[in-house]
Amino acid sequence: MIRVPLWELFAGELRRLRTEAGLTQEALAERVSYSASLVAAVEQCRRAPRAEFTERCDEVLHGGGLLIRIRDALVQEALMPWFREWVGIEQEATALRSFEPLVVPGLLQTEEYVRALHEGASPLVGEALEQQVAARVARQAVLDRPAPPQFVAVLDHSVLSRPVGGSKVMREQLAHLVEVGRRPRVHLHLVPETVGAYPGLNGAFVLATPADGDDVGYLDNQLHGSIVERTVDINSLRQTWESVRAEAMPHGATLAAISEAAKRWS
């Protein structure tokens, strides 16, 4: 049996539903409040479909959830096999503690920032790259649900000055950090540039607290990520977290610093 890639399947079903509804790309774009160029790009597999775009198209075209189901499968397929287990843990966690010394944490990245990271540091191109962008953005829905986990993120000050994607991307990314940082269950903390060597410089990590059971950790590297469950390792990550958190600025001061940094990218 010849397997049809899910992205091509999504594009084909979107085109079929649109045609059956008697709508041009321009007419559909107007009804879903997106540009006709985006509709064309999705139908030609040049842009991966975002969640809101998919939901609006499915509703307008009376897809009965078909487009949503295909996109969900597409996002799951795009995840690296070794990362799928962690995403499941992340989605079910009641609390997430994240430290990032180099880039904005994945759950807080804008789509253009994600794309710029992949374009600059990933061997992926074209469809494969766009699938990874869509998959990362889709994970962020965990912070939008009615009862989101408590999310505490510590990031190094250098993250604010690294020109990922250029001035416009950075300005929008930092503005997004401030916006998300104002949510009740999101707390951001910045390690000031005056801090010298500290334990966090050994690498990024995340601690997830499940509804029941002990914390689970995640470590990333150049090849793949690793899930950490051994008690001794979790205790070590907790100690590192406490050390990193102790070096960081309070939440309010952090948001003020990020806002100032955003202005410098204007």
Image: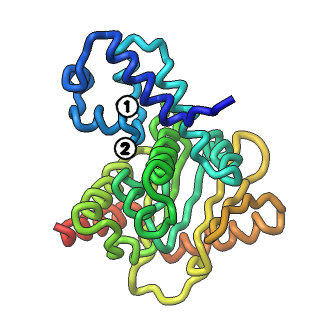
Image quarter of residue 12:
top left
Mark number displayed over residue 52: 1
Image quarter of residue 15:
top left
Residue at x 27% of width, y 68% of height: 166
Point out the image quarter for the C terminus: bottom left
Q: How is the image coloured?
A: rainbow
How much space separates mark 1 and mark 2, taking CA atoms? 17 Å
**Residue 7 in the figure: left or right of residue 38:** right
The kind of residue tagged 2 is Arg
User: Which x, y percent locates residue 176?
Assistant: 32, 53
Q: Is residue 136 visible?
A: no
User: Which x, y percent locates residue 135?
Assistant: 51, 45
Q: Which residue is mark 2?
A: 46
Residue at x 26% of width, y 57% of height: 172
Mark number displayed over residue 18: none
Sooner in the amino-acid sequence: mark 1 or mark 2:
2
